[in-house]
Image: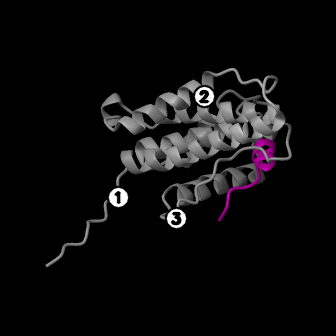
Amino acid sequence: MSLPEYSEVDDALSSGGSLVRAAECHGVLCGILCASGSSDMQGWVRHLFESRDEKLDISAGALKILHDVHQSTLTEINHESFEFSLLLPHIDCAIEDRIEALSDWCSGLSLGLSMGGLQDKMLENEDVLEFVQDVQNIAEACFGAESDSEEQTEQSLAEIEEYLRMGVILLNQELRPSTVPSPTIH
């Protein structure tokens, strides 16, 4: 199962009155999964819709899309092949929208780590601590594509996305190490 398209998730959230965008929604889920090793889908969905327009109903279709995000993320983040992907707008979208979504994703990851129970004592690995700090800095950064060429901006964005993708894999492995025992040699 692969992640639904960004626009599908964004539409599902907005149709139910959520103020959370798709990238932030995925970041929150990833943070919860990394920090706690599991995610209560109902609790995650409650968070996504806690500040919503009460006049709008959350449709079964919207919940199905969110279920698919939850299941595919859970599968990908724990998969041995490192095929984890970030839920971000398609490359054909405006660069400004993609940069904003990347910042939202990082904000969501930081929030999800907190919601998942991340504590300072869990950040003993320097690489993990540096990654968590970088995520917070990216979330707070004010990006501008004005000073770089579009090609430079695209390259920088791709590098940041790959850094985040691999960082989440590292974070998940360090905070939730495999419980499979190493083989012993006799």
Identified by mark 2, the residue type is: Ile
Residue at the image position 54 percent from the left and 26 percent from the top: 136
Q: Position of residue 84 (x, y in %)?
A: 58, 55
Q: Please name the residue that numbered disc 1 is placed on.
A: 178
User: What is the quadrant of residue 58 in the picture?
Assistant: top right
Q: Is residue 41 magenta?
A: no
For marks 3 and 2, give the CA distance.
26 Å
Dot 3, crowdedness within 10 Å: few (<14), some or many (≥20)?
few
**What is the quadrant of the C terminus in the image?**
bottom left
Q: Identify the magenta region.
A: 1-12
At label 1, the amino acid type is: Ser
Please indicate whether residue 111 sits to the left or right of residue 92 in the image: left
Residue 18 visible in the picture: no
| Label 3 close to label 2 by CB (< 8 Å) | no
| Secondary structure type for disc 2 | helix
Label 2 crowd bin: few (<14), some (14–19), many (20+), radius 10 Å: some
Q: Dot 3 lies on which element?
A: loop
Rendered residue at 35%/53% (across/down) = 177
Per the image, the residue denoted by label 3 is: 81
Residue at numbered disc 2: 138
Percent x, y of residue 75: 54, 60
CA–CA distance between discs 1 and 3? 14 Å
Label located before the other in sequence (1 or 2): 2
Question: Residue 104, how many percent across, how many down?
Answer: 67, 31
* Residue 89, label in figure: none
